[in-house]
Image (cartoon, helix red, strand yellow):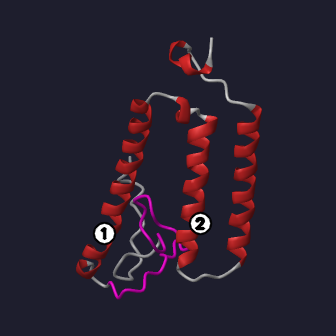
């Protein structure tokens, strides 16, 4: 059976040359990622890292997952899925700038809350032996418990 008639076959067998080329490109892009990390490009570092990561993901999808030799419908389904993810992330990023102004006490400089003092999960924060007004609560009556 010739390679032109692979539509009737169940799978496509990738050549060793193609797989090694893809592997080499992935290794080169990984080295490039580490090299770019060592250089400060300012706010462009994230953009460069994402471009390299998307290129690596595209290589894996096309050649290791054989999407390059699959039906066009499967490629369209993957593309639409990626487009949906990108749109959801973009909508979330657009929305984050809209609600900060309405938060009471928001001054534009977000600081991580300090949870080292306890509390959380519904527990009261502070010393359990002191009432909120500073007075020490009375001990429970032993006779009332019986």
Give whichever of discs 1 and 2 has the lower sequence position. Answer: 2
Q: Nearer the viewer, residue 123 or 76?
A: 76
**Bounds of the magenta segment:** 106-128
Q: How crowded is mark 1: few (under 14 residues within 10 Å), some or many (20 or more)?
A: few
Q: Is residue 56 left or right of residue 19?
A: left
Q: Which residue is drawn at 72% across and 76% down?
A: 38
Q: How far apart are marks 1 and 2 (CA)?
A: 21 Å
Q: Residue at x 35, y 88 (%)?
A: 107
Reading the image, the residue beneath label 2 is: 49
User: Quadrant of the rendered structure where residue 104 is?
Assistant: bottom left
User: Quadrant of the rendered structure where residue 44 is?
Assistant: bottom right
Reading the image, the residue beneath label 1 is: 94
Magenta stretch: residue 112 in it? Answer: yes
Element on which disc 1 rests: helix
Magenta stretch: residue 44 in it? Answer: no
Where is residue 37 shown, x and y percent of the image? 68, 72
Q: In which quarter of the image is the N terminus?
A: top right
Where is residue 68 shown, x and y percent of the image? 54, 36
Q: Which of 57 and 139 is in front in this view?
A: 57
Q: Residue at x 30, y 75 (%)?
A: 97
Element on which disc 2 rests: helix
């Amino acid at each position: 059976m010739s390679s032109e008639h692979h539509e009737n076959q169940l799978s496509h067998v990738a050549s060793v040359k193609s797989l090694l080329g893809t592997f080499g490109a992935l290794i080169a892009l990984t080295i490039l990622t580490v090299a770019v990390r060592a250089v400060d490009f300012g706010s462009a570092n994230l953009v460069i890292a994402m471009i390299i990561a998307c290129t690596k993901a595209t290589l894996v999808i096309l050649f290791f997952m054989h999407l390059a030799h699959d039906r066009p419908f499967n490629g369209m389904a993957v593309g639409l899925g990626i487009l949906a993810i990108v749109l959801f992330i973009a909508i979330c990023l657009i929305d984050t700038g809209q609600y900060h102004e309405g938060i009471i006490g928001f001054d534009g400089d977000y600081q991580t809350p300090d949870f080292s003092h306890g509390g959380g999960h519904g527990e009261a924060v502070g010393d359990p032996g002191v009432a909120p007004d500073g007075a020490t609560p009375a001990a429970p009556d032993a006779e009332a418990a019986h």
